[in-house]
Amino acid sequence: MIKKLIFILFIGCSFNSFGQGMNKFGPVIDLGLGFYSKTSDSLDIKGGLNPSFGVSMQNYINYWFSLKTTATYAFKSTETTKVNGGAKDKLNGQFFDLCLAGRFSGFDEDVKALPYGTAGLGCAFNIVSKGQEKYMLGCSYKGALPYLTLGAGVGIKLSFFSEFDLSLNYNRYLVPAFTTPLDNKNARLNQVSLKMAAYF
C-alpha cells in the first residue's frame, strides 16, 4: 500500500513537471514547529523547531488552480524527559521531504495580493538520526519506510516583479516518527509551519 502511494506521488510530480500550464521555479524556506501526540506513559515527548529549505515548482493549470511540487532538506528535533526521575535525552534527524499540493486561489489574477488555500500529500525520507546520549541510545527515526504526510494550509500570493507566497500549514505524519525505547509506544508527529517561497 505504501509503495503504491509513493508511486502515485511521483507520477503526480512527473505530471506537474510536464503539464501544459506555465511553470515557475524558486527557493522555499519552511519554518516548522513540531509536536507529538501523547502516547508514552514513561516519557514526556517535546517537539521543537523543524526548519527546512529547498526548491519548489508551480505549474499553473488555469487562473484558479495550480500544482506545486516541493523538495526540501529538513531538520527535526525532539526532546524527551523521563516521567520518573526527570532524566532528559534528545533525538535529532535530517530528512529529505517531497510534497505535491494543489493550490486553490481567487479568481482575479490582476490584483497584487490573492489569498489561497492548499492541500496535498508528501513523503519524508529519513537520512540521519543523531543526538541520542542516554536512554534514547538505539532509538532512531524510522528509516526503513518513508513517512507519508497529509497537509493543508492557507496563504497569500503577492505579485510584484515576481511572485512571493507566504502560507501557514499543518502537516500530519501518518507513520509514527519513532518508537519509545522504555515502553515500546509509537510517537506520532504533527507540524505547524510558516512557509515562504518565491517563483520566477
Image (spheres, rainbow, N blue to C red):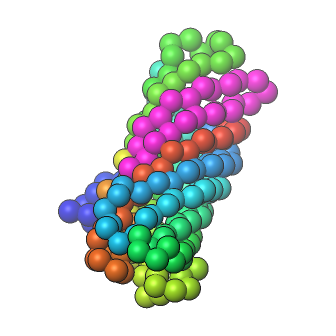
Question: Is 155 positioned to the left or the right of 118 in the image?
Answer: right
Left or right: residue 197 compared with residue 40: right
**Is 161 contained in the magenta span?**
yes
- Quadrant of the rendered structure where residue 179 is? bottom left
- 161 shown above or below 102: above
As drawn, 81 above or below 53: below
Looking at the picture, does residue 36 appear above or below residue 113? below
Quadrant where the image shows the N terminus: bottom left
Q: Quadrant of the C terminus?
A: top right
Relative depth, front residue between 9 and 158: 158
Inspect this view and state whether residue 62 appears. no
Span shown in magenta = 151-173
The number of callouts visible is 0
- Is 154 part of what is drawn in magenta? yes
Q: Residue at x 49, y 70 (%)?
A: 80
Query: Residue sitting at 45 percent across and 68 percent down?
Result: 125
Q: Residue furthest left?
A: 1
Compared to residue 112, the image places residue 67 above or below, namely below
Residue 39, percent across and down? 31, 62
Residue at the front extreme? 85
Which one is in front, 136 or 153? 136
Identified at 65% across, 12% down, the residue is 111
